[in-house]
Every structure is written in structure tokens, then in C-alpha cells.
Image (cartoon, rainbow, N blue to C red):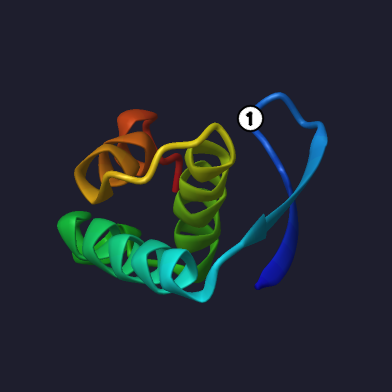
Amino acid sequence: MSAVAFEGTNMVTIAAIYQPELIELMKSVLDEAATILPKTRQTPATKVKLASRILAAAARGERDPIQLRIAALLEPVDE
């Protein structure tokens, strides 16, 4: 298990512990979500925003990769 602390969308630090399988799933979802964006928006800063949204959704209990990807991409990415 790995512990992860991050700032959720409401700017409150949240700590969660994830199983290795879920971490791999979230990494895969992050990579898929990033490739959906136009090349000009595939920046490290954008990837951090996407990852934060995926982590926030996972912290709420979401485990469906499609729903995690939707959570990552639902909000516009300003870059």
C-alpha cells in the first residue's frame, strides 16, 4: 500500500492509502486522459491537474477507469 497526500478540488489536503493495483490503474487512466488532450496541452502542469482530479475521485471511492478518466477531463484545463 502507498499513502498519498494531495490537495483536492476544495484546496483541503486529503490523505489516502491505495493498493498497488489501484495505483497502477490510476497511472493508466492518467496516461490515457493526457493523450486525449491536444498536444499543446500535454504539459507537466496539465498532467498534475489531471492526476489531482483522479486522486480526488479515487478518494471518494471511484474505481471505474472510465469514471476516473471522466473526472480527470470533466473540468477544463487552463493552459
Side of 22 relative to 31 (left or right): right
Residue 29 falls in image quadrant: bottom left
> Residue drawn 44% across and 48% down?
79
Residue 32 lies left or right of residue 13; in this view the side is left
- Observer-nearest of 33 and 5: 5
Q: Quadrant of residue 12?
A: top right
User: Compared to 64, does 74 lie above or below?
Assistant: above
Number of on-image labels: 1
Q: Which residue is mark 1?
A: 9
- Mark 1 lies on a secondary structure that is loop
Task: Please state the horizontal and vertical placement of residue 63, each as a whole percent of the image.
Answer: 36, 45
The residue under label 1 is which amino acid type?
Thr
- Above or below for 73 versus 2: above
Q: Is residue 62 left or right of residue 58?
A: left
**Split into 4 quadrants, where in the image is the N terminus?**
bottom right
Residue 67 percent across, percent down from the top left: 27, 37
Q: Nearer the viewer, residue 79 or 36?
A: 36
Residue shown at 26% from the left, 56% from the top: 33
Residue 23 image offset from top left, x and y in percent: 48, 69
Taking the spot 71% from the left edge, 24% from the top edge, the residue there is 10
Asked if 71 appears above or below 51 in the picture, the reply is above
Which residue extends farthest right? Answer: 13
Q: Residues within 10 Å of mark 1 (few under 14, many from 20)?
A: few
Q: Residue at coordinates 37% horizontally, 32% vertically from top-left? A: 76
Q: Please state the horizontal and vertical placement of residue 37, each as a whole percent of the image.
A: 22, 54
